[in-house]
Amino acid sequence: MKNHHRSVKVLRRGDLAKLTGCNLETIRYYENIGVMPEPPRSIKNYRVYDDSHVARLRFIMRARELGFTLDEVRDLLALVDGGAQTCGEVQALANAHLASVRAKIADLKRIEHVLSSTVAQCSGDDVPECPVIDALTEVA
Amino acid sequence: MKNHHRSVKVLRRGDLAKLTGCNLETIRYYENIGVMPEPPRSIKNYRVYDDSHVARLRFIMRARELGFTLDEVRDLLALVDGGAQTCGEVQALANAHLASVRAKIADLKRIEHVLSSTVAQCSGDDVPECPVIDALTEVA
DNA sequence: CTAAGGTCTGTAGCTGGTACAGGCTCAAGG
DNA sequence: CCTTGAGCCTGTACCAGCTACAGACCTTAG
């Protein structure tokens, strides 16, 4: 056994990165902006993580995958850290975020519609006339 | 007549901003990154614009509204400036952009689905148990 | 003449990271 | 024992796409 001299394998930054799939530098970034806590340091000043940090980082990464901004993540974490979060409070945050996701989808759909219907008029030929250029040049 | 001493009203940066609705500083930014041309300067070093600049800026703004990146805008402008753009070339750029718009929509729809179905399970009550928190905390 | 507004420049800030450089430290191999 | 490579530390710069501000100059109306 390699680590017979210590009862628990300590996690360093690289280990945390591998365990979570998070970029190494991003971990430090999250610490700097205060969404990850400052971990204790080893005698040689290395960050020392444990399971709670793994869970925390996974939480953050899942929230980011769902499109929550880091500000929103901070709010979620504040609720959870307070220990007194209520389903109602969390639901309110999630609903606010859901609204902004839906707004983005609506924006993109509008764009998609304009683009696809314009492109559909293209001949695609070697001629200079182009409905896309016309749409961009249009004298409102 | 106010401007009897000059045959044409020259456009300054603020005028261009007002005419197009573009932010004042953004105009300078577009010049710096090379999507707007460097305009001639007045004797006192003020930028002097004309109708061609108005048209150019409107073109850029419309392309941005359609979600084209500034790099893509540069490509479109290069084609148009070359004077020899073909409908096929423009169509190719537009289609590439359309694909990325559709990819973004798909991403956001996936997010919207996960979020809305999770939030739908919330009681919304003053209880700590919350399906949203559970989803974020989930032990994969 | 003066005061308010416009314009000029360079630079800093925003979000959400990513990627160095330059210096330490640690572990294994020869 | 020494070297070599990997890992970690810090600070800083960079990306898009702007936006804003400071400090200096200029213009225009009253």
Image (cartoon, coloured by chain):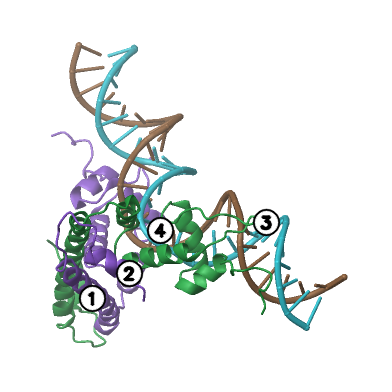
Chain colours: A purple, B green, C brown, D cyan
Left or right: residue A22 versus residue B45 is left
Left or right: residue B63 versus residue B33 is left
Q: Is residue B114 visible?
A: yes
Of circles 3 and 4, the one toward us is 3
Alpha-carbon distance for marks 3 and 4? 45 Å
Q: Which mark is residue A110?
A: 1
Q: Chain of mark 1?
A: A
Amino acid carrying label 1: it is Arg
Q: Position of residue A89 (x, y in %)?
A: 30, 82
In the rendered image, which residue does mark 2 sit on? B65
Of circles 2 and 3, the one toward us is 3
- Upstream in sequence: badge 2 or badge 3: 3
| Crowd tier of the residue under label 4, counting other residues whose Cα lies within 10 Å: few below 14, some 14–19, many 20 or above | few
In the rendered image, which residue does mark 4 sit on? A33
Of circles 2 and 4, the one toward us is 2
Q: Give the quarter of the image for residue B128.
A: bottom left
Q: Which mark is residue B12?
A: none
Amino acid carrying label 3: it is Lys
Residue at horizontal 56%, vertical 69%?
Answer: B14
Amino acid carrying label 2: it is Glu
Are the residues under badges 2 and 4 in a single subunit?
A: no
Q: Disc 2 on helix, strand or loop?
A: helix
Q: Position of residue B94 (x, y in %)?
A: 21, 60
Alpha-carbon distance for marks 4 and 1? 35 Å
In the rendered image, which residue does mark 3 sit on? B44
Q: Is residue A45 visible?
A: no
Tell me if residue B93 comes above or below residue A89 in the rendering: above
Alpha-carbon distance for marks 2 and 3? 34 Å
Q: Disc 4 on helix, strand or loop?
A: loop
Q: Disc 3 on helix, strand or loop?
A: loop
| Crowd tier of the residue under label 3, counting other residues whose Cα lies within 10 Å: few below 14, some 14–19, many 20 or above | few
**Image marks 3 and 1: residues in contact by CB distance under 8 Å:** no
